[in-house]
Amino acid sequence: MTEETAKEIGDTIGTVLKQSDGSEWKGGTFLRVRVRVDITRPLCRGRRVTFEEGLERWVSFQ
């Protein structure tokens, strides 16, 4: 996963404030993105994301 992909996923939730440096999660199974969310709306548990290769995966949010 690239930093651009991480930002795009974060942007679907709210305003991206900060994300992990790519060296922290390169090759890992998770990444950290800090997002400002509207607390008057329900939180979502995740989203289905289509990656460049056409691979579709569920991305869980915690």
Image (spheres, helix red, strand yellow):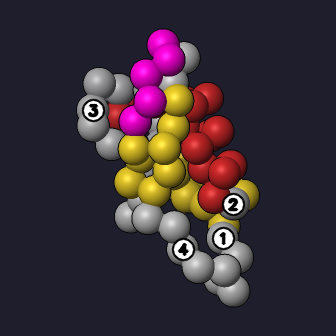
User: What number is the disc on residue 43?
Assistant: 4
Task: Answer with left or right where residue 49 lies relative to residue 25.
Answer: right
Q: How dense is the environment of label 2, judged by Cα within 10 Å: few (below 14), some, or many (20 and up)?
A: few
Residue 13 against residue 53 in the figure, above or below = below
How far across and down, in percent of the image, does residue 44 sit? Answer: 51, 67
Q: How dense is the environment of label 4, judged by Cα within 10 Å: few (below 14), some, or many (20 and up)?
A: few
Q: Nearer the viewer, residue 48 or 12?
A: 48
SS type, badge 2: loop
* Contact check, label 2 and label 4, Cβ < 8 Å: no
How far across and down, in percent of the image, does residue 25 sit? Answer: 35, 34
Q: Earlier in the sequence, mark 1 or mark 3?
A: 3
Q: Which residue is mark 1?
A: 37
Q: Earlier in the sequence, mark 4 or mark 3?
A: 3
Q: How dense is the environment of label 1, judged by Cα within 10 Å: few (below 14), some, or many (20 and up)?
A: few
Q: Where does the magenta region start and end?
A: 53-57
Residue found at the very far bottom of the displayed protein:
40
SS type, badge 4: loop
Q: Earlier in the sequence, mark 3 or mark 2?
A: 2
